[in-house]
């Protein structure tokens, strides 16, 4: 058994592992640098952001088991049925979320996207209902799921900005009608104009970036695929693999903030 000391063999295996790990991380580094270059040089960029981008500012996602509010799931509150049954309860939930959002600050990922928009033609669509992208300086944000900072009159459709501590349920100052949160609930269609603009942006971009979304709720996955089919370079940043990952030219397994930092090295 000379020359086959198990200790030596193990050491060799370990160092082989280390070599392939190094090679893999060098590959990722090279691919990330290439994606960062593509992003920096693209004339048209389309971006879609999801809950992961807000979570980095401390805004809870209200999804999954950690998202309970007074023992209720988001899926049981963010529906037309829940609102019809108990509008006051649904408004209390949105009032609590509004207070969290207004107390939150945009993070480095929001700011990196705003900075990129100042250098290139960038369309930014978001599934988030906070205003953190606007507050970071992004313009023309396509809010696919609306914005919880506004109420929408159920009679005349008028939008009004909400301030923390508003009387609920709010009423329209123009017609006195009852107002609902200006968000898209489960089972409701996305605002067609906003969705159309997002589709246009992803169809015509050179680089598409999908950031901080599990891509389970449409159109997250379909927008990325659309861009890819039209020849765009597709970058995904999300800690977990998603249905979009197989389509991506680069799938960075990072949270939003370190992900944008890795892509902003130019
Ligand atoms: Zn009204």
Image (cartoon, rainbow, N blue to C red):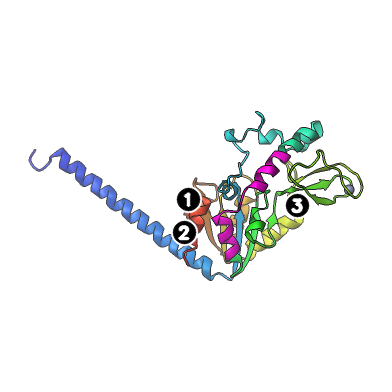
Residue 200 in the image: state x and y as whole percent: 68, 62
Residue 204 figure quarter: bottom right
User: Residue at the spot x=53%, y=47% of the render?
Assistant: 242
Give the residue pinned by disc 1: 254
Q: Quick check: 191 left or right of 251? A: right
User: Residue at the spot x=68%, y=63% of the render?
Assistant: 139
Sequence-wise first label, 3 or 2:
3
The segment highlighted magenta reads 94-115
- Spatial distance from mark 1 to mark 3, Cα to Cα? 30 Å
Mark 1: secondary structure: loop
- Spatial distance from mark 2 to mark 1, Cα to Cα? 9 Å
| Residue 263 falls inside the magenta stretch | no
Give the residue pinned by disc 3: 191
- For this orientation, the residue located farthest to the top is 71
Image disc number at residue 125: none
- Spatial distance from mark 3 to mark 2, Cα to Cα? 33 Å
User: Residue at the spot x=55%, y=69% of the render?
Assistant: 42
Mark 3: secondary structure: loop
């Amino acid at each position: 058994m000379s020359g086959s000391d198990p200790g030596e063999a193990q050491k060799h295996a370990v160092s082989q592992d280390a070599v392939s790990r190094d090679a893999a991380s060098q590959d990722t580094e090279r691919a990330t640098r290439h994606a960062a270059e593509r992003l920096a040089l693209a004339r048209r960029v389309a971006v879609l952001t999801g809950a992961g981008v807000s979570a980095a500012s401390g805004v809870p996602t209200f999804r999954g088991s950690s998202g309970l509010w007074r023992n209720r799931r988001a899926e049981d509150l963010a529906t037309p049925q829940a609102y019809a049954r108990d509008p006051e309860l649904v408004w209390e939930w949105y009032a609590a979320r509004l207070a969290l959002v207004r107390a939150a600050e945009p993070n480095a990922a929001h700011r990196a996207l705003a900075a990129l928009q100042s250098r290139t033609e960038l369309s930014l669509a978001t599934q988030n209902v906070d205003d953190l992208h606007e507050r970071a300086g992004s313009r023309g944000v396509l809010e696919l799921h609306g914005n919880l900072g506004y109420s929408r009159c159920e009679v005349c459709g008028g939008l009004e900005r909400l301030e923390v501590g508003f009387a609920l349920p709010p009423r329209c100052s123009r017609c006195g009608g009852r107002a609902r949160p200006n968000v898209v609930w489960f089972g409701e269609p996305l605002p067609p104009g906003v969705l159309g603009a997002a589709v246009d942006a992803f169809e015509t971009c050179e680089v598409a970036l999908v950031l901080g979304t599990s891509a389970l709720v449409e159109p997250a996955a379909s927008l990325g695929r659309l861009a890819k089919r039209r020849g765009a370079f597709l970058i995904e940043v999300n800690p977990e693999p998603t249905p979009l990952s197989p389509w991506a030219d680069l799938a960075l397994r990072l949270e939003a903030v370190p992900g944008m930092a890795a892509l902003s090295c130019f």
